[in-house]
Image: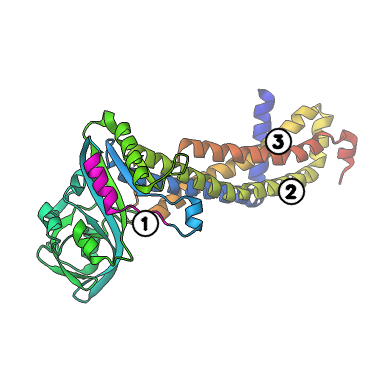
Amino acid sequence: MFTLIESLRSACQSIAAHPLRSALTIFGVVVGVASVISVVSIMQGFRAAIIEEFQGLGGNSLSISPYTPLEDGLAGRIARLTPDDLEAIRTRVPGIAHITPLAFSRVEARYGSQATLTEVRGTTHTYPRVYNAYERIGRFLSLADDRNRRRVCVIGEKTREVLGLPDDPIGKHIALAGEWFKVVGVMERKGGLGGMNPDDHITLPYRTMRSLSPPHQPPDLLIQLTVADIAQLDPVAARIRAILRGLRGISPGEPDTFRVQTADEITDAFDEVVAAITALVAGTVSIALLVAGVGIMNIMLVSVTERTREIGICKALGASRHQILMQFLIEAAALSLLGGIVGLLAGLGLGAIVGSTIPDFPGVSAPLWAIGLAIGFSALVGLAAGILPALRAAQLRPIEALRYE
């Protein structure tokens, strides 16, 4: 223990004696650790925002979306859900509490002199119950709106702001694809991430949107539903799969051209994607730590050369090879660990700054595993970089070291 404490004291004295050299040596470690921590913390904030959106669907919900297998995609066959799929699920699957279609398109919206390209959705009166989304002012679309294909719409807060509509825009008219639509409601603000803003949308009655779409270019369609009994979630999903495979004539063994997923499955799939991206980016920026290790090795070799006479004196006074080896290893590890701590603080600060520039970003957070991995890896780099210089110092002969000038 005494040897360890003495080696640590000697390492700190050596680092303090050359502050500029020490700072330049750990700069690479600081950059590497700061990059890893900032990337991971931003990705964690992004993940939290998306998961919060999925959690709003509830545990008793199912999402049905088109899926194009690779072979079909290469052949130009793009899978789509159709109104017939919606009707078959609605009428032939028992246990459904609420079901709503969600058709998507990108359309230019105009109000006065203001215009914006926004997401236009087509849905039904059951949308608020399925998505747990409600209006701030006015009303949502009714069953009569859908049946009569009325030219009415509900807008998001972001769309209202961009178009310059008043805080209470009920009764105002906006232009979509050459048609005029009356605003009957404004949805509550949810907040989002930059371009992925759930408040930037215009919602129309489902049949109204279908009547506006050209036959050769139908809108993309998703189907969302909730089951009356959560215990029947899996049987309902299995029944939907069987019906859709039958409608498409899919033979046993062939892949589905659709996906039936629960909110938890969607969250898990997103988690896997985020984890893969985080690992890839973090691994890429970690190359800076390896470069920093080479810098530490070079500096430690220079330090051994400069302190050759000092090493000779220590050995002449009885210092063992083990003690000399430990002294230089601890010095290299201390340099790298110091850079890891500074890099950690810099990475957290950088992540917070970047997160604050993204509208409605929920905040950044670095998980403990990322902090431990970054600090531990930086210390390991220091130890690995210090082995060669430490061995060189430990192998010096006292007489030759004392004669060195």
Image quarter of residue 207: bottom left
- Say which residue appears at 31% left-offset and 36% top-offset: 239
Along the viewing direction, whichever of 386 and 211 lies nearer the viewer? 211
In what element is the residue under mark 3? helix
Query: Residue 268: x, y in percent?
Result: 41, 39
Residue furthest to the top in view is 1
Residue furthest to the bottom in view is 113
3 or 1: tag closer to the N-terminus = 3
Query: Residue 395: x, y in percent?
Result: 84, 34
Q: Is any part of residue 73 visible from this angle?
A: yes
Q: Looking at the picture, which amino acid does disc 3 mark? A: Leu
Q: Is any part of residue 262 visible from this angle?
A: no
**Relative to residue 385, is residue 162 drawn left or right?**
left
CA distance separating discs 3 and 1: 43 Å
- The prevailing secondary structure element of the residues shown in magenta is helix
In the rendered view, would you say 177 is above or below 271? below
Query: Residue 330: x, y in percent?
Result: 67, 35
In what element is the residue under mark 2? helix
* Quarter of the N terminus within the rendering: top right
2 or 1: tag closer to the N-terminus = 2
Q: Which residue is mark 1?
A: 358
3 or 2: tag closer to the N-terminus = 2
Which range is magenta?
A: 78-92
Q: Which mark is residue 298?
A: 2
**Relative to residue 166, is residue 361 drawn left or right?**
right
In what element is the residue under mark 1? loop
**Relative to residue 31, is residue 69 drawn left or right?**
left
- Say which residue appears at 69% left-offset and 26% top-offset: 3
Q: Which mark is residue 329?
A: 3
Indicate yes or no whether the magenta region holds residue 83. yes
Along the viewing direction, whichever of 349 and 263 lies nearer the viewer? 263
